[in-house]
Amino acid sequence: MNIAQPGGRIAILASGRGSNAQALIEACRSGRINGTVVLLGSNRPTAPVLDRARTAGIATWAEDSRGIADRRAWDLAFLQHIAAADPELIVLAGFMRRLDAEAIAPWYGRMINIHPSLLPAYPGLDTHRRVLEAGDRVHGASVHFVSAELDAGPVFAQCRMPVRDDDTAESLATRLLPREHRLLVASVAHCIHGDIRLNGSSVLFRDRPLTTPLSID
Ligand code: GRF
């Protein structure tokens, strides 16, 4: 093991602001996760998350996915670059692209995603608005293993918070974000430390089947 890079090797994929990526980078630095972020990959070469990674001294790989004719070829090539960094775990943290099933298949059980809803409710976009429109009293975020279907792989951890009468989509997003950071850090720690793993389509927590997602609030 390289002394400068302790613990598990983590690659992060992100497309935008990168606050979740930043939380992971800091958790690795402080030892809350016994791991190292070995690469940050993005499909948006101007995404702010790339500057955050560079400032933290983390290697980056960025390639624009817009206007690509052959989506599968792009996804395969992109993940090949990520694989070259030899990560144990790939974390999608605000990665706004649905990857091709063939490209993600080799990573099944080693690729996780954070999604801002209590899955299986509200896969896809605009989750905060949809929660308000439905009149839900509780909102939250989920971390799940990535499978071929959008936001539908096995969920293993969630955080929850009440919806207030005066909430807007923006206020929900703002209040959820710090909870997402805690949820993602705890989830990645569980994966990297070997507490959580996938066995077929069942999640095991410390070698026992996990029947309901871990609650991380
Ligand atoms: C988060 O809400 C995440 O759940 C969603 O996109 C947002 C990304 O935020 N998929 P950031 O880029 O990590 O700040």
Image (tube, rainbow, N blue to C red):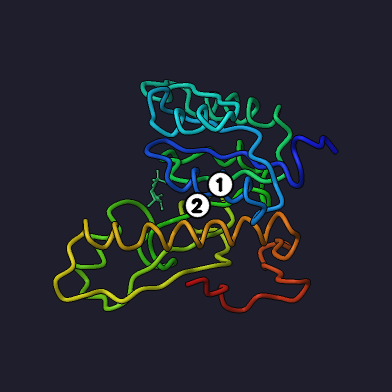
Please give the label number shown on residue 204: none
Residue pointed to by mark 1: 26
Describe the element under mark 2 as helix, strand or loop: loop
Please give the label number shown on residue 149: 2
User: Which image quarter: residue 135?
Assistant: bottom left
User: Which image quarter: residue 175?
Assistant: bottom left
Q: Residue at x 76, y 35 (%)?
A: 4
Q: Residue at x 61, y 31 (%)?
A: 79
Disc 2/disc 1 C-alpha distance (Å): 31 Å
Locate residue 131, reporting x and y percent.
Answer: 26, 67
Describe the element under mark 1 as helix, strand or loop: helix
**Callout in the foreground (2, 1):** 1
Amino acid on which the number 2 mark rests in the picture: Glu
Q: Residue at x 48, y 21 (%)?
A: 63
Q: Is residue 74 above or below residue 87?
A: above
Picture mark count: 2
Q: Residue at x 82, y 35 (%)?
A: 2
In the displayed structure, does residue 153 sit left or right of residue 195?
Answer: left
The N terminus, quarter of image: top right
Mark 2, Cα crowd under 10 Å, few <14 / some 14-19 / many 20+, is: few
Give the camera-side residue of 82 and 98: 82
Locate residue 154, reporting x and y percent.
Answer: 58, 63
User: Which image quarter: residue 192?
Assistant: bottom right
Locate residue 95, reporting x and y percent.
Answer: 45, 41
Q: Is residue 107 above or below residue 155?
A: above
Q: Residue furthest left?
A: 166
